[in-house]
Image (cartoon, rainbow, N blue to C red):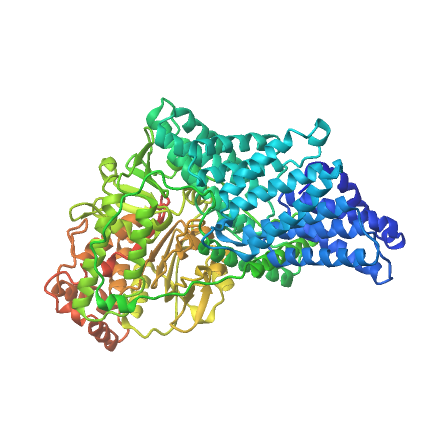
Amino acid sequence: MIGKPRDAHRRSVGVLTACNEGADAINLFPGLAETLLEGIAVHAESQVAWGHLSQAFELLDRASEIRQSFEARDYAFRDVTHFKLARAEAVVSAVDGDVTRVKDVYQRLSNWNSEKQRSGVGTSRLFHLETLLSVTHSSELAWAASRPGGQVSSENPDNAADAVLQRYEAIESEARVLVDDGHRAFRFLYHRVMSLKSRMLQRCGRHQEAINLVHRIADYEDTLDEGEWHLVAQDTSVIRTLAMSKALEASGEPRTSREFAEMAVQCLEPVEWEVPVDLSLETLGWASELSFREWRLAGKIERLHDAMRFSKRLIDHGMHTRTRDINPSLRVRVQQTLKAAFDLRVEACYDVDRHTDESVIDQAFFASELARNRLLLDNLTILPPPRPGSVPEELLRELDQAKINVITSEAVWASEDPETNWGAHPVSSSPGSADPVEADSEVENAVDDRPKSSLDPSSMVAESHRYARLLRKVQRHDPDYSATDPIRPATLEDARDLLRNDRTALVQYHVTPRDAFALLVSKTGDARMIKLPDASGSFLEDHFGRWSRRFGNPFGTITDRESWQRLGEAIDDSLRSLSEAFIEPVAPHLGGHDHVILVPHVQLHAYPLAAAFCSGSVRLGDLFEVSMLPSVSIGKRILDRQGGVGSETLILSARFQSHASAKFERYAVQSRMGAESMDLSKLSLSEISQASEHARYWHFIGHGHWEGSNPLSSTLRSDSRNRWADLSELYSRLCLPSAEVVTLSACETAMKMPNQVDEFVSFPSAFLYAGAKNVVGSLWKVSDAATTLLMDRFYHYIGNGRSVAGALRLSQRWLRGLDDDGGEALRSGAELSRHLEQVFRPMARREAEYERLRQELKVELASTAAPFDNPASWAAFGCFGLGWRSPGSPKANSR
């Protein structure tokens, strides 16, 4: 983009105001319309520079309407007007990532100019070349936005990239001829096209050519006088210096590369908010990475401070940009760059804390918190926004659906393209690991090889534009209508507020490609930051890949006890290797505590961490009550929203259940809690939400189906066939203002989508967003009979006043055959038989129901050992939320 967007913004605001207030005059006077169209073109480009993409498209739509109305009357606008509008369309479309539209604009301009030249009517040659250069640069930006990493290598050529490079070369050739002929007006354009070409050469892997061209540009700059320097666009120096830095790094000159990266930052400083967002963030990210890498390799403390300084600027800039009205693909790219910045800043904070007298753990915690859930939190509300009576209900429903479509498309897009384009290589190789688990044939055959979704970016963009248009329509009815209720990132003090007493600790993990850390927070005393020596992002990614392939979906397909036993042993073996890296280094620091709140990171969300090992055969859940939070920000929101809690218990289930176990689970909750049962098959989500206003305990009995390729379309079902609600609807429409405990007694209700951009999308997070303070859910398909026993025992402990995390811990110990706090345990089939006779037989409506329950448990009843000690039977369930209950929680009907 040529020119200063901020100045362009000021100049064109008046023209836009005239457009809104003088529509009749515009229709009468073509000259005014022509001036207005040129002003709109400039204003659209300035809006893009400020990140307001939807406004830019609205301006272009307005311009199209005006132009079409005059063309219908056979009025021909000036060539300059056509060129300015075309250039604005290309610039806006490029930021939108719409390669096809930019290509169409370029072709349209070329054809139109050729016709003019054939008819003997030509435009200014300088303006023509300026426009072609701007559109070509837009083609490059659109290509880079559509290609993961925005880079090609000499081994993998790209036809679209070659076409962009050829256009640069054609413009450069024509400009050079004119400059050599003494046309000084073309000198700044010649300088700009060479700078843009150097960046494209570097993108195409032609590094030495890029270096040579930058040297030629430097020689050429010596010939520019002071007046000509004022014509050089703000981003030109940044572009070619960044190209030089990256080309030098690829050519094996890291120190010189870092020096040029710092020069690029210096060039950026006076124009940081005037150049495209991608360029600012890429420049700051590249400089941060190179400075940090030199610190790690050479031990130069000044480089560490440089990395801290650059990463802070990047995060400030990126967080400000992310809150603007920007299109989905740009938001994803911004978040990808921010993800790398957060990782680097946490690493740098650890090094600063270790090697200097400065304490920056609070900064590390804040950066780690910012890294969590940003895409989702930017789009969702904890509670639906108020429904203004002046807005038609049908329009609000359209807006809701459009919002769901945008959230879904962004989540899929983010999960498919998790890489950033800093071009950084790991400082040192991360520790490898050998998985001690070899897959059994029964398990391997049951793996669910879910296909990756191939989302068309143009459809994502279209959904975003549709949502923006609908939101503007709503705001015409009610200007104060707000579609968001953002969650603010939490601080270290906020984390301490989540701890109910001195015996509660919080452990926040942060995993980067190079390293992994645990931040320990207690009610009193200083926070500590522990580097996990055998853990890293690459280790976790590799481990999770094997875990998901091995345990992706085998639990519903294994029926014989021998295979089930081998599966449990495999789970423990895999958890041991994970525990050695992530749990054992932390456990010694948790002495003196009895409740631990874990805040996992990336793939750690997908593991049953309470079942992980502290040492030997001792599990984390054997020593502590364990609860998990998606982020401290969500925990803070839970505390902030605490008001009056309900007094009711609500059971949601299908009226008819095929398994006796599911029936007895409903009977047990009704007996323990005095609950009201509602038939899911007859109620909509809005009706359930209304009925749940005063529900303190909310128990779902049904089916969960996790959709790995598109998690937001995962569903809760009243039975195996009838869908009740999907995850996107729960996020956007469910409201549980009084819920203290939500129990999801169904398969796969705690499954998650961990990825590098927005890591935590799950049923528990949806219910936490809806207002629940604690959620109990499962990570995999579980036995109906084991679930019924676990849930009955869970509400037994809840009724006795236990915390949610404590009740789940004791229930799992009892089910495993280990003593609970009263010395009770399910140690054998005989113990199970006595328990069924004492607790479940009195609940039966008919004797036949009880006999069917015993038939479903016949294998376990015959066991001489603890029938459910296998982790596949009990470890799936976890407590998500704070883990504790509000003071004064009423006791239920304890048995």
Quadrant containing the N terminus in the rendered view: top right
Please report the residue visible at 24 percent of the width from the left and 39 percent of the height from the top.
585
Q: Where is residue 401 in the image (x, y as percent from the top left)?
A: 57, 61
Q: In the picture provided, is 173 more to the left or to the right than 417?
A: right
Q: Where is residue 173 in the image (x, y as percent from the top left)?
A: 66, 46
Quadrant containing the C terminus in the rendered view: bottom left
The answer to whether residue 405 of the structure is visible from this angle is yes
Nearer-the-camera pick, 352 or 323? 352
Q: In the picture provided, is 789 more to the left or to the right than 424?
A: left
Q: In this view, does 23 lie above or below 833?
A: above
Residue sitting farthest toward the left: 864
Q: Is residue 648 above or below residue 421?
A: below
Q: In the picture provided, is 419 more to the left or to the right than 846?
A: right
Please report the residue visible at 70 percent of the width from the left and 27 percent of the height from the top.
226
Task: Locate residue 399: give its quadrant.
Answer: bottom right
Residue sitting farthest toward the bottom: 848
Task: Locate residue 865: give its quadrant.
Answer: bottom left
Nearer-the-camera pick, 73 or 627? 73
Residue sitting farthest toward the right: 28
Q: Where is residue 328 in the image (x, y as percent from the top left)?
A: 56, 52
The answer to whether residue 737 of the structure is visible from this angle is no
Q: Where is residue 228 in the image (x, y as percent from the top left)?
A: 71, 31
Q: In the picture provided, is 266 more to the left or to the right than 25?
A: left
Please report the residue visible at 76 percent of the width from the left and 41 percent of the height from the top.
13
